[in-house]
């Protein structure tokens, strides 16, 4: 019975449709073909752009453009956006150097720097400085470091020097012997009165609700990890920390007040080695 009812309903629908279409012209293949053609013509093929790797030879060639060198000259090369506030693109070149281009959206670059990956302060602007002279210098990593490098934390509009904590450091004295020192310091959560504070201000040039901070060492470490605690844990050294991801010596600061601890290790030099902890307090500006 149910099957018969379904059949009758189906026949009724078919007849109704036939009645509705009796005044319409049949659609021939000639009628259908232009429609298919129109659809095909309006289909957009999306292809993934393949970027090239920037080389030192290409950097030298581009540098000849001088002050007219701009963002568009580097569009074909693979980069990472590491800025927050300022628009900063990082281009990997080789194991020793990278290129950083920074500026405000819609404006000429403020800088186009060739930077040593082991020391971010060791750099030149390729538009005005001599690249060959820069590359021919002795690298700072050949020098003996008797103490752990300092760490500076920078956002788009402010910078502070992080507080150095527990360290273990050794260096070559140059007479066939090594000198070393181990220093044990207070836990960051027990160091509120000594902790440097980084005032967090949202960038007017970024739509991100969070803010990035760059970690600048005097000499870049071979390994680095970062963790943090909410400032509700001041004085509670047993509080569990949260891991913070690090990308190209840049971290994303959390919303609210947080204490950050940076652990760094140097072990690739034959003249010094060691580890150091650093900490700072990031808090929204009043």
Image (tube, rainbow, N blue to C red):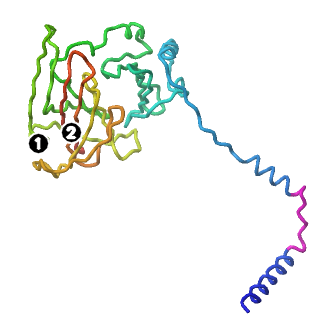
Whether residue 285 is visible here, answered yes or no, is no
Q: What's the mark number on residue 21? A: none
Q: Are marks 2 and 1 in contact (CB under 8 Å)?
A: no
User: Is residue 275 depicted above or below 25 in this figure?
Assistant: above
Left or right: 3 in relation to 67:
right
First to last magenta residue range: 21-31
Toward the bottom, the furthest residue is: 1
* Dominant SS type (magenta): loop
Q: What residue is rendered at 33% in x and 35% in y?
A: 250
Where does the image place residue 265, in percent across and percent down from the top left?
23, 29
Tell me which corner region of the image, top left, top right, bottom left or bottom right, holds residue 284.
top left
Which residue lies under the disc numbered 2? 261
Left or right: 115 in relation to 41:
left
Where does the image place residue 239, in percent across and percent down from the top left?
16, 51
- For the residue pair 180 and 47, the one nearer the viewer reads as 180
Where does the image place residue 111, in percent across and percent down from the top left?
41, 22
Q: What residue is rendered at 71% in x and 90% in y?
A: 2
Q: CA distance from mark 2 to mark 1?
A: 13 Å
Which residue lies under the disc numbered 1? 192
Q: Which label sits in the foreground, 2 or 1?
A: 2
Q: What residue is rendered at 37% in x and 16% in y?
A: 124
Left or right: 185 in relation to 40:
left
């Amino acid at each position: 019975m149910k099957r018969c009812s379904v059949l009758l309903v189906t026949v009724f629908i078919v007849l109704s449709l036939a009645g509705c279409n009796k005044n319409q012209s049949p659609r021939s293949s000639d009628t259908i073909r232009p429609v298919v053609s129109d659809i095909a013509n309006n289909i957009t093929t999306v292809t993934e752009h393949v970027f090239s790797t920037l080389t030192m030879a290409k950097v030298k060639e581009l540098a000849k453009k001088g002050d007219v060198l701009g963002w568009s000259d580097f569009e074909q090369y693979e980069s990472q956006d590491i800025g927050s506030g300022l628009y900063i693109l990082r281009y990997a070149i080789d194991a020793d150097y990278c290129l950083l281009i920074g500026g405000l959206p819609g404006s000429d670059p403020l800088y186009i720097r060739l930077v040593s990956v082991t020391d971010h302060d060791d750099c030149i602007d390729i538009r005005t400085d001599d690249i060959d002279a820069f590359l021919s210098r002795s690298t700072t990593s050949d020098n003996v470091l008797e103490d752990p490098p300092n760490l500076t934390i920078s956002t788009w509009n402010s910078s502070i020097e992080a507080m150095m904590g527990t360290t273990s450091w050794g260096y070559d004295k140059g007479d066939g012997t090594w000198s070393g020192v181990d220093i044990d310091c207070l836990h960051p959560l027990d160091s509120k009165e000594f902790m440097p504070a980084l005032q967090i201000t949202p960038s007017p040039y970024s739509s991100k609700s969070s803010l990035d901070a760059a970690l600048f060492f005097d000499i870049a470490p071979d390994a680095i990890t970062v963790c943090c605690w909410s400032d509700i844990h001041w004085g509670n050294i047993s509080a569990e920390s949260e891991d913070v991801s690090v990308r190209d010596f840049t971290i994303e600061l959390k919303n609210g007040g947080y204490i950050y601890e940076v652990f760094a290790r140097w072990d690739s030099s034959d003249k010094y080695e060691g580890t150091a902890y650093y900490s700072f307090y990031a808090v929204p500006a009043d």
